[in-house]
Image (tube, rainbow, N blue to C red):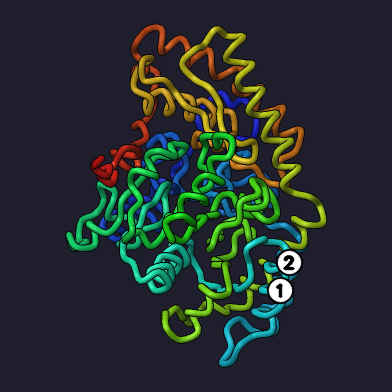
Amino acid sequence: MPNKVKFNKEFPVIKKSEKLFNRSNGLIPANTQTLAKGPTQWINGIAPKYLKSGKGSHVWDVDGNEYIDYNMGIGPLVLGYCYEKVDKAIIKQLKRGITFSLVHPLEVELSEKIREVVPNAENVRFSKTGCDVTTAAVRVARAFTKREKVLCCGYHGWHDWYISVTDRNAGIPKAIQKLTYTFNYNDIENLIQSIDKDTACVILEPFVFEESKPDYLKQVKEVCNKNGTLLIFDEMWTGFRIALGGAQEYFGVTPDLACFSKAIANGMPISVITGRKDVMQLFDKDVFFFTTFGGEALSLAASLATIKEIQKNDVPKYLNKQGKKLKDGYNKIVQELGIDFTKCTGYNCRTIITFDASAGNPLEIKSLLQQEMIKRGILWGGFHNMCYSHSNKDINYTLKAYKDALPIVKKAVEEKDVKKYLKGIPVEPVFRKTSNFNLKPAKKKK
């Protein structure tokens, strides 16, 4: 029998997953289209590699094993799998057509809805993926300011202008690499020292997991305004999750441009760039940003239905409430167990569990906890990406699973032999450097 959401005596049988994985070897580079979903981010040999279906907050792998999911498609499932009202909107539009030869009315209707709920949305444009619109934002910022350099903070996709600052920058010309630099989050002096008169834009995730210092984002905006630099919020994670209008609504800071994806359509592929009319109007002719599938109607219908559900049910409030239970509950458990090498942090709608390197290899420790959570029917990648379908029953069961699994992790750490407890190959890092990387040299004092 496949494993269920309960304590299972054995680890899940994943024969079909492994068979599919073997078929992908030599056929699909990295075996996946999305790195965070791939085998390097899950304990290899224990975790399932392929999911087949989902409903609400639960998913089933190809072998029939059931799990509570806290990755939620790496973010897009803000309402949950197979959410009825969104699915009905998709099916209704499917019967009418997917992609058309002229503009579809939903492009106007959805743009009006976004303008209604997003503070800076004087103009709206659509595409398919997050990196599409972050790249469009950088391009239009360069055109508007007549400048070239970019300062960024966070993760912004695979396109050349951004990925050149990481250690996965093969194939990108050196000239491109010299135009983008990073700055450290919550360090306003770092930004002040890095920005200059050739900085076209500052693009950042309003938060990733670290909580913003008081007025930090307001200070970032002030620095940008003073320098004539455009401020871009990458709201892939914050948009429609921390608040209906995103981080700009939550923090009361209005950027010049903002980019959205993930939660806006509950799983359908769509991305959005919003912003000041005087900047966005450059997309009319000066800045080329058009794509065949930008007006694909199924995603537009899904997005409109999703936003209406978020608005009607105050979904951000629910995510905050349920996420707080998990964060506080986890931290209470580790305190009661006398564990000092792990904690749960971040804004409640999306929290992360971290492990202190002084206790051992953090990736091995994470792999062990992941392994034990999978045995208990929880698909856990180190995060709590909350959705509207995460019930009180889900939360209570998850905390019980943590209470059962963490003593195993504690024992392994105390014995200084975590590897001994691992039944599979540990997870791997995504990037080898994630901070203090490619920082723009500080300006020399006169």
Residue at far front of view: 446
Camera sees residue 69: no
Of helix, strand and loop, which one carries label 1? Answer: helix
Residue labelled with disc 2: 116
Q: Secondary structure at mark 2?
A: helix
Image location of residue 370, percent across then percent down: 48, 30
Residue at 63%, 78% (x, y): give it: 297
In this rendering, is residue 95 above or below 427? below
Separation (CA) of disc 2 from disc 1: 6 Å
- The percent position of residue 409, horizontal first and vertical second, equals 47, 16
* In the image, residue 305 above or below residue 335: below
Q: Quadrant of the C terminus?
A: top left
Between 430 and 368, the residue placed more toward the observer is 430
Q: Which mark is residue 112?
A: 1
Of 185 and 225, the residue lying toward us: 225
Disc on res. 395: none
Residue 57 x/y as whole percent? 67, 45
Which amino acid type is shown beneath numbered disc 2?
Answer: Glu
What's the residue at 64%, 84% (across, down)? Answer: 97
Q: How many marks?
A: 2
282 in relation to 416, above or below: below
Q: Nearer the viewer, residue 2 or 407?
A: 407
The picture places residue 195, in percent across and down from the top left corner, at 35, 51
**Is 419 located above or below residue 155 in the figure?**
above
